[in-house]
Amino acid sequence: MNKELASNVRSALRREQREPAAAGARHADLYESAPVGYLTLDRHGDISRANDAAGLLLNTSCDQLVGHSLASFIIAADRNGYDCFLQRALGSNHQEQCEAVLRRTDGAEHYVRVQGQWDEQSQELLVVLVDISDRRAVEKRLSVHLAAMSLFHDITTQFTSNRELAPLMDAVVDTAIKISGCDMGLLQTANPENGALQIVAQHGCPPAMLERLAALNADSPSPDARAPWQKQRTLSEDIESASSTIDPGLRQILRAAGVRAMLCTPLMSHHGRFLGMVSAFWRKPPQLDAIVLDLIETLAHQVAALLDYRFTEHEREQLARLIEYTGHAVITTDLKGCVTYMNPAGRRLIGMASNKSLGELRFSDYVPPEWHEFLLDTIGPAIDERGVWVGEMQLRNLRTGALVDVFNTVFLIRDPQTRGPWCYASVNRDITETKRTDEELKHLQAEMQQLLQWQVAHQTVAAIAHEINQPLNAVTAYSEAAQQLLGKLNQPPEKLAHVLECITQQADRAGKVVRELITFLDKGETTVETIDLKEVVRKAIAVAKSTSHGKFRIATDFAPDLKPVRANRPQISKVIVVLLQNSMDAMLGAGSRGRITISGHVCAEGDKAHITIQDQGPGLDATAAQRIFEPFFTTKPRGIGMGLTISRALIEAQGGKLWCEIGTGPGATFHFTLPLAP
């Protein structure tokens, strides 16, 4: 019995000795393989023991950690915080903790949470190191995001409360600097006309840098001319090595300002229009991550949206002013034909007071009834098929009832969201006066053509009469002489006398026919009236241009004291048209597009008006100038040579004079005078 009891006691003692050893072994295995760093520190903060995770965290072996102070691995900025933690942990039985940045032996840094509790039994500080770098990175990104969102909100609030762009642009640059941590910030906007970049806001940029950048922008206005200002984000972490993306002139400017790196982010509208550029500059290599770049990109998108809204708003205001002050009637109607808008010109056109409400006014109210069928059968289908109709029609003035001729453009406006039909718009140009002027010109042209035909016949007959009268007179004279000689003979041959008498009669008869024809052509009375030469010249210019095949500039220069004259209006108009057409034909034949000048003044004698017409054509040689007024003489391939002959006759018939001057300048110069009205 005693032996059995002793054996049991010995077994129990051996079991009790094995269990603590197993527990200790299990504890050691857990200590070494734990995913967090375990350290044991003495009262001085020196490491007495460390597990593998702690060695891995500090990039050294466990044995090499022993004897080193944990504080030696804490960066200087966090040393005070760690010292406070150590004092608290050594003087308390409670768990204490702090957060700090550990610098590994290879220089890398990690955020860690340090947890420690004093063990009275072992008189050691048990420390746990937990790597929280990922968490801190997330927190940092979140913090940056929150700060950026706050700044973005401030910019938007500032834009909505104050529409001035200058403070807004300054806020954008400041925000870019805060987000990126750059040393200098710059905001440039693109000129809508030529794309040239203009500096509108900056922070920290030296004046010399700004001046040279402005000069560089002026020399190369296109944003596509230099790679850094391309329409995509450009990051140059070292401007010296980025030789392929930086203009040499720009690199020199940045180098002089001490810039080492730069980030250029374009401002693009939602339509793809280049609006400008926001740029950040560093004097040392930047620490940029994807989060910062994305935030800068977001800032650029927000600023671009605000600028696009401002530009669009400005364009809308300009368009609204243009529509409001244009001389053409602009009218919009809904799909049912009710008028929704009418500009002042439209109200004047249809006779509506500016203060009168459109009310239930419909498009058909001011369209004459005879045009309703055309509106339904022609205009409507054209808009449905092509979206627009262009042509002439008539509208009715509601106040006077008068019909107004208009050149009308009617088109469909679609909803910008659904692209479905939204409303109709029409732009109406009043052509009543234009059509009246066209009718006057046609009448004047017909009148001048009739006058020309009449004068051509007159001058032709006069020329023929001049040539025929001489031989007829000679025939008559010889016949009479022959008759006289025969009369002296004692027995004249009766047959010969009869023949000679017949010759004389027929010659007299031919001369009488010519004189009667000339008298018939001359019997039309020429109406003389007091006319304003300036007005006659203006209408003659319109007629000449309407019949010309080229584009010519015709300038007038009349003396202020030029008085009215007494003359026949159609005839003087025809003379001016002939002279202008001759000048245009000569310049067109020579391939010239020069200017024709018409000037007028009162002659020195004070009794006549003097008009000069000078062109810039090939001019006339001396021979042509001497014969230019002869009937049937012409320098034109298809001319009949009667225009200047008739013109001189018309001017001289009214007491004036028409002549050509040689050697006064380029081209040909013609002058004519007319008596002043009493």
Image (cartoon, helix red, strand yellow):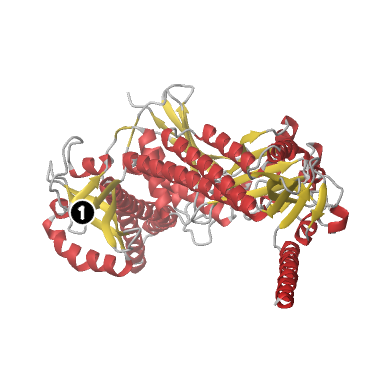
Quadrant of the rendering where the C terminus is positioned: top left
Query: Residue 458 location, x and y as percent?
Result: 35, 52
Instruction: Give the class, few, some or many, for how many residues have Cα within 10 Å of label 1's Cα (few <14, many ≥20).
Output: many
Query: Is residue 299 shown left or right of residue 428?
Result: right
Query: Is residue 387 shown left or right of residue 395?
Result: right
Residue nearest the viewer, comparing 377 with 130: 130
Residue type indicated by callout 1: Gln
Query: Residue 11 location, x and y as percent?
Result: 73, 74
Residue at 53% over, 50% down: 301
User: Eyeballing the image, is 601 above or below 95?
Assistant: above
Query: Residue 427 location, x and y as percent?
Result: 30, 51
Residue nearest the viewer, comparing 427 with 154: 154
Residue at 70% over, 58% down: 36
Quadrant of the rendering where the N terminus is positioned: bottom right
Secondary-structure class at tag 1: strand
Q: Quadrant of residue 278?
A: top right
Query: Residue 480 location, x and y as percent?
Result: 38, 55
User: Eyeballing the image, is 601 above or below 416?
Assistant: above
Give the residue number, with chain letter if any, for mark 1. 394
Q: Evaluate whether residue 570 shows in this view.
A: yes
Q: Evaluate whether residue 473 shows in this view.
A: no
Residue nearest the viewer, comparing 5 with 132: 5
User: Eyeballing the image, is 476 above or below 659?
Assistant: below
